[in-house]
Image (tube, rainbow, N blue to C red):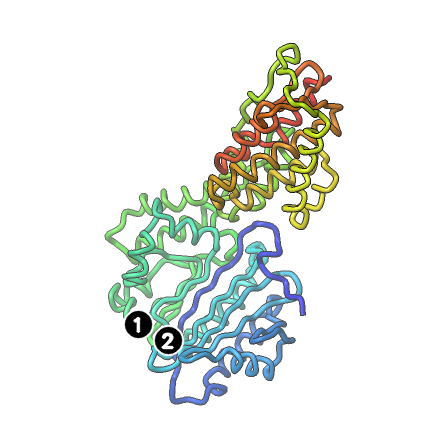
Amino acid sequence: MKSLSVHDLKPEDSLWFDFKGDVDPQAAQESELEPFLQSLEAYADEWMPNVVKGKRKRKYSRASFWQALEEGHDGNSSDLGLYRTEWPALDGDLGLKHPPRRPQLHVLINVKPLSFFAKAERCRKFVDMVRVWASRYPVDHAKAHSSDDLELADAPSFGRDAETQRRDGFDKIYEVFWLNVFGPKLVQSVGRERVLSTPAWRVEELPNGCVLLVTWPTAADFASDEARLAQARAHAHLRPDLDFDTVLRTLRARSALLAPVEPRFHPDLAPLLSRVVDDVASYERQRKIAEFNAWQPPEPEEWAPATSALPSDVDDPEAAREHYDTLAEHLVALLHTKAPSIFDATPESLTDVDFHFWHQDFPTRYLPEVIERYAIPTVGAYLGEVLVRHLGGQWIPRRKLEEAQVRVGSRVWFPFVRARHYLRSRQSLLDHSLTWLYRVAERYRS
């Protein structure tokens, strides 16, 4: 059964929900989880999971849920996955911890896209579902919020470092999110009256002493200035030691990083840069677009006037050209499953090669001696072959690979030198891309 993962959709924001609630270790498992399942089925509606996964995926039903949970039992815990086959995408995980560990129900839900929660009624049902869960399974702290904004909130420039978070947990109110459930200990540390008087869209005391707090009617517009004002007011109210203006300035800075940026990439490299942008985490996407809008690739240096070309110094030029073809075929063998276009040795295939190496972070992942011995010769030969086939280039073989040239019009190009520059770093894959050299050679040919 094919499920639709959040990773199958284009890079964009999603709603992330993290819930850990205490369960009764003495109660029968089915009766203990009945309120959870009832409220999920009652309120999830259009994002309701229809696939459950234990050892394998099955259509969601109560019977398949219990079967998957049994299959996911391992020592002191049980786990299963919850997914959907249709938009919106859902990646969900349910785990039960058993004694001697603290008995807990742990639910992680990621629904993509976040824009799905632009409707107030959908958000209200989500909040009502969480209210049922938090009333039945007491939490220390639970939250639902934009996954992109959560990434920024956890960045060292905006919040606590990862080591401190692991050590201290949510021992005080470091952040206020779109949806929050504060456990009795957190409420007591702030003061129940103060918590219940928080300026927010919804504040509700639950029967077990937890407090549900929602800052704004809809999750999708969390980054609007009105929603950020509401978020800052709630946070500053709950943490009177914080300065409201500082809190608001931080939230606005995060919104600015997530604000849509119109791509204005260099036209010759737009196909490559668009794919790179789609490959980065969605919370980095707008920042990367702005970076590429301002970026200009350096003019290729791996050329000389045709009048200065080095003459061939090999005994058998034809054998040398066959050797370059064989080296290029090695790259085809390496990449053909990831980039099938490489069989055709077209200009477009150079963009596929550029993206593949960038996606794999090839210069970092492989040892320098491997790059020197295998990658540089094969990449250089492949680039040279494309220049020959599509620009009418002519190989000028040399004993040293780095001296080998391809004559195109009034210039000779050094493809193996380009490959060396190209494979120095991940940034070099863009600065010295194969695509860019080809487009410049194409321009000068005419």
Instruction: Return the residue at label 1.
Output: 184
**Residue 418 coordinates in the image, percent (x, y):** 57, 28
Give the structural element (helix, strand or loop) at label 2.
loop
Q: Residue furthest front?
A: 315
Q: Where on the picture, by quarter, is residue 112?
A: bottom right
Residue 50: quadrant of the picture: bottom right
The residue at the point 46 percent across, 86 percent down is: 29
Front in this rendered view, residue 150 or 423: 423
Tell me the amino acid under the disc marked 2. Answer: Pro
| Label 2, residues with CA under 10 Å away: few <14, some 14-19, many ≥20 | many
In what quadrant of the picture does the N terminus appear?
A: bottom right
- Element carrying mark 1: helix
Q: Residue at x 60, y 41 (%)?
A: 355
User: Taking 112 as reference, is 371 above or below it?
Assistant: above
Query: Which mark sits nearer the N-terminus, 2 or 1?
Result: 2
What percent of the width, then of the height, locates residue 341?
71, 42
> Residue 99 location in percent, x, y?
35, 82
State yes or no: discs 2 and 1 in contact (Cβ < 8 Å).
yes
Q: Is residue 228 above or below residue 62?
A: above
* CA distance separating discs 2 and 1: 9 Å
Answer left or right for 21 relative to 123. left
Pick the residue in front: 387 or 200.
387
On screen, residue 349 above or below 388: below
Q: Quadrant of the C terminus?
A: top right
Q: 310 left or right of 78?
A: right
Please, which residue is most extreme toward the top here?
307
Residue at image location 49% in from the left, 59% down from the top: 217
The residue wearing badge 2 is 138
- Dot 1 amino acid type: Pro
Asked if residue 386 shows in the view, the reply is no
Residue 197 in sight in this render: yes
